[in-house]
Image (cartoon, rainbow, N blue to C red):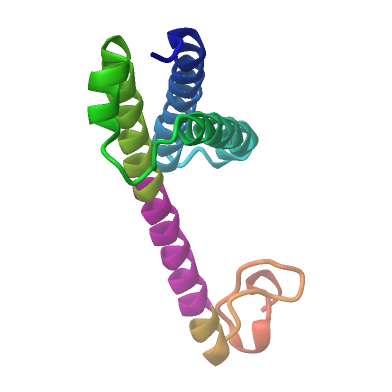
Amino acid sequence: MILSAPLDDLLHQAISSMQTLLGLLKEEQSYLISNQLDSLLVLTIDKQTAAFEAEQAGLALSQFFAEQGINPQSDIDAWFTEQQPKALVQWHLLLEHTRQAAAFNTSNGKLIETRQQLINTFMQQVLDASQNSPLYAPDGKLTSLPQGQRRDLA
């Protein structure tokens, strides 16, 4: 029988780091939806740190399982049921947090991609429209006159 303390510590660390990452991904989605781009910049650093910590915690769990002779492709639930039944609930909690984090990450990526496509389309429309008559004068003021002549000087 394997000592449960190392496994409990590893599961606790993995769950904690994944909860942190999940919270940041939810926050990121909120910022994306509400167009709070400045907040996103600050959040990005925290999210990268949390993702790194979650990855390290996952690697530590994988190493623990490897040391126990457990193949990552095998039925981990069966191993928990036989060896550490009390830790099975924690394992499922970790899996659920990981599933949710992956879903939020995918969703946020799609939101970012959509926003980028909209901006690119808008910029192309502005560029196309300005080919016929410049929208801005050399000093950056809006114009609708030929050759970019400013309205106040026409």
Q: Position of residue 90 (x, y in %)?
A: 33, 17
In the foreground, 48 or 139: 48
Magenta stretch: helix, strand or loop mostly? helix
Q: Position of residue 110 (x, y in %)?
A: 37, 55
For the view shown, which residue lies furthest in the right direction?
139
In the foreground, 62 or 151: 62
Asked whether, in this view, residue 39 is left or right of residue 75, the answer is right
Quarter of the view holding residue 96:
top left
Q: Is residue 132 magenta?
A: no
Question: How many dots with numbers?
Answer: 0
In the foreground, 17 or 83: 83
Visible in this render: residue 82? Answer: yes
At a point 71% along the width and 74% down the height, the residue shown is 153
Q: Position of residue 117 (x, y in %)?
A: 43, 67
Asked whether, in this view, residue 92 is left or right of residue 32, the answer is left
Asked whether, in this view, residue 16 is left or right of residue 84, the answer is right
At a point 51% along the width and 24% down the height, the residue shown is 17
For the view shown, which residue lies furthest in the front direction?
1
Height in image: 37 above or below 49?
below
Q: Position of residue 142 (x, y in %)?
A: 61, 68
In the foreground, 40 or 15: 15
Q: Quadrant of the N terminus?
A: top left
At a point 48% along the width and 8% down the height, the residue shown is 5
Height in image: 17 above or below 126?
above
Q: Quadrant of the C terminus?
A: bottom right
Quarter of the view holding residue 49:
top right
At a point 31% along the width and 35% down the height, the residue shown is 100
Height in image: 74 above or below 122?
above
Visible in this render: residue 33? Answer: no
Magenta residues?
107-126
